[in-house]
């Protein structure tokens, strides 16, 4: 599950501020209000549905069995590790059957023990992030459970194998995905209002993964509805699928910078080499940008490295939002970013670089009672004008960046081309 990023700030003297002790308070006010509202709604729903539910031993047994299956999945993948940024799992294969087979209160409670297990056994993160994740998943499961039981009936509806309950279960699974993704998307957009909605909702890959996960959840629900013992047969395929998914995510994480989510230097160079070879083969234009945050060391010295990381994340987000899907963006190290613009000439590269400079200058990073702004300097190099391979283009763009800094920073520059040599006239050739 994806949740918004969080800011934790320490003062220059290293004394933890209020935002450092309570990271939630370091977020934007609309985000804080929204998170608290969703969590409060989930708590109210738990109290209301718990009071209206008759707890039975069969339900408790099914609930426990599905939670144990989820715990086995977590433990089976724990040794692989789940670094920051790797957030996809197959736990909805167990939360969704709980929503379909049991009263709504169980769907509200189900995420809590598994999120605690993730926090303690896999990777520790901010507590309010875990609590919000529990609330979002619980409310999504509650909505699916209320709809299914209102229109389809109890556990026996799925075990009968008739068409209508199965179709209803599929519809409830879609509702589960819509509510869960919607709650998280609103939080992500509140954390970064300048981001595009398409970035916090589905792309092709996440949509495909959600479809697989929901289909798996419906299959597990039908299997469990027939006989609880059949979970023994459903568990190994889910574990194997989750391990395969996690392995793919770890491979993707090895290509990205852990702080910004952009390509790391090695992966960017491989992608850039491929694009340059293609452009040279097809005779196309190509431009390269090197972007450097002005006086970034002052930000780290004045506000601490944690807030400096938030500046890097903000700049990276602006680059992603303002560039095309096929532009190659990476973090080159420290406060430097590199961008490859396929099929871009000098005028388009300058236009893009200027737009990025203006957007980053408008960016605001909240801190204790104030907001931080930064500017960037950018050097541009054009293929066939300033170089023909990656090394030549990087060197030319770096010279242009150095020129931008010499001229006062917060500007975009091209390399200064050396004047062509002037040949003296041949004395043996008569004038005219």
Image (cartoon, rainbow, N blue to C red):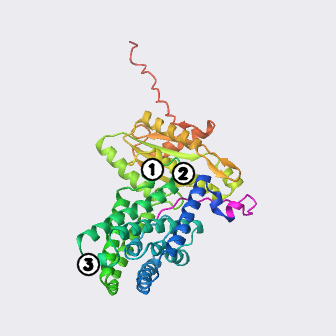
Magenta highlight: main SS: loop
Q: Residue at x 49, y 45 (%)?
A: 395
**How crowded is the residue under tag 1: few (<14 C-alpha within 10 Å), some, or many (20+)?**
few
Position of 137 relative to 363 (above/below): below
Q: Which residues are magenta?
A: 1-20
The quadrant holding residue 191 is bottom right
**How crowded is the residue under tag 3: few (<14 C-alpha within 10 Å), some, or many (20+)?**
few
Work out whether residue 407 or residue 261 is closer to the camera in this orientation and state it.
261
In x, y percent, where is residue 384?
39, 39
Is residue 93 magenta-colored? no
Position of 339 relative to 128 (above/below): above
Q: Nearer the viewer, mark 3 or mark 2?
A: 3
Q: Secondary structure at mark 3?
A: loop
Q: Earlier in the sequence, mark 3 or mark 2?
A: 3
Position of 278 relative to 182 (above/below): above
Q: CA distance from mark 3 to mark 2?
A: 47 Å
Q: CA distance from mark 1 to mark 2?
A: 10 Å
**How crowded is the residue under tag 2: few (<14 C-alpha within 10 Å), some, or many (20+)?**
some
418 to the left or right of 159: right
Residue 298 seen anywhere in this rendered image of the structure: yes
Q: CA distance from mark 1 to mark 3?
A: 41 Å
Quadrant position of the C terminus in the picture: top left
Q: Secondary structure at mark 1?
A: helix
Residue 209 seen anywhere in this rendered image of the structure: no
Work out whether residue 62 or residue 150 is closer to the camera in this orientation and state it.
150
Say which residue label 1 marks. 197
In x, y percent, where is residue 42?
53, 66
Q: Secondary structure at mark 2?
A: loop
Q: Residue at x 38, y 17 (%)?
A: 429
Say which residue label 3 marks. 160
Say which residue label 2 marks. 192
């Amino acid at each position: 599950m994806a949740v918004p990023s969080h800011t934790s700030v320490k003062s220059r003297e290293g004394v933890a501020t209020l935002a450092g002790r309570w990271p939630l308070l370091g977020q934007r006010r609309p985000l804080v209000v929204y998170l608290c509202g969703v969590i409060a709604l989930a708590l109210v729903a738990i109290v209301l549905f718990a009071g209206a539910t008759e707890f039975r031993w069969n339900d408790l047994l099914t609930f426990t069995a599905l939670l144990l299956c989820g715990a086995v999945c977590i433990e089976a993948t724990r040794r692989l590790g789940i670094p920051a940024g790797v957030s996809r799992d197959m736990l909805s294969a167990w939360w969704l059957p709980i929503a379909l087979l049991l009263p709504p209160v169980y769907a509200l409670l189900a995420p809590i023990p598994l999120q605690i297990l993730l926090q303690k056994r896999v990777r520790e993160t901010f507590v309010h992030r875990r609590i919000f994740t529990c609330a979002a998943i619980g409310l999504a499961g509650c909505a699916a459970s209320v709809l299914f039981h209102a229109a389809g009936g109890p556990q026996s509806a799925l075990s009968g194998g008739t068409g209508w309950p199965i179709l209803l279960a599929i519809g409830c699974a879609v509702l589960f995905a819509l509510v869960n993704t919607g709650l998280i998307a609103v939080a992500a957009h509140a954390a970064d209002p300048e981001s595009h909605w398409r970035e916090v909702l589905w792309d092709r890959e996440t949509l495909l993964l959600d479809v697989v996960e929901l289909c798996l959840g419906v299959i597990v629900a039908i299997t469990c509805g027939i006989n609880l013992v059949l979970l023994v047969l459903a568990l190994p395929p889910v574990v194997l699928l989750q391990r395969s998914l996690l392995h793919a995510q770890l491979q993707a994480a090895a290509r990205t910078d852990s702080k910004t989510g952009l390509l790391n230097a090695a992966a960017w160079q491989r992608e850039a080499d491929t694009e340059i070879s293609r452009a040279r083969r097809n005779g196309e234009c190509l431009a390269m940008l090197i972007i450097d945050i002005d006086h970034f060391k002052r930000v780290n010295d004045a506000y601490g490295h944690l807030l400096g990381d938030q500046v890097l994340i903000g700049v990276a987000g602006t680059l992603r939002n303002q560039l095309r899907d096929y532009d190659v963006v990476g973090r080159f190290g420290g406060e430097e970013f590199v961008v490859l613009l396929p099929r871009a000439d000098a005028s388009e590269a300058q236009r893009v670089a200027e737009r990025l400079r203006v957007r980053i200058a408008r960016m605001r990073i909240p801190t204790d009672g104030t907001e931080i702004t930064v500017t960037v300097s950018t050097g541009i190099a054009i293929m066939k004008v300033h170089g023909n391979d990656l090394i030549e283009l990087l060197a030319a763009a770096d010279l242009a960046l150095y020129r931008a800094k010499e001229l006062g920073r917060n500007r975009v520059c091209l390399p200064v081309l050396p004047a062509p040599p002037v040949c003296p006239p041949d004395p043996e050739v008569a004038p005219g």
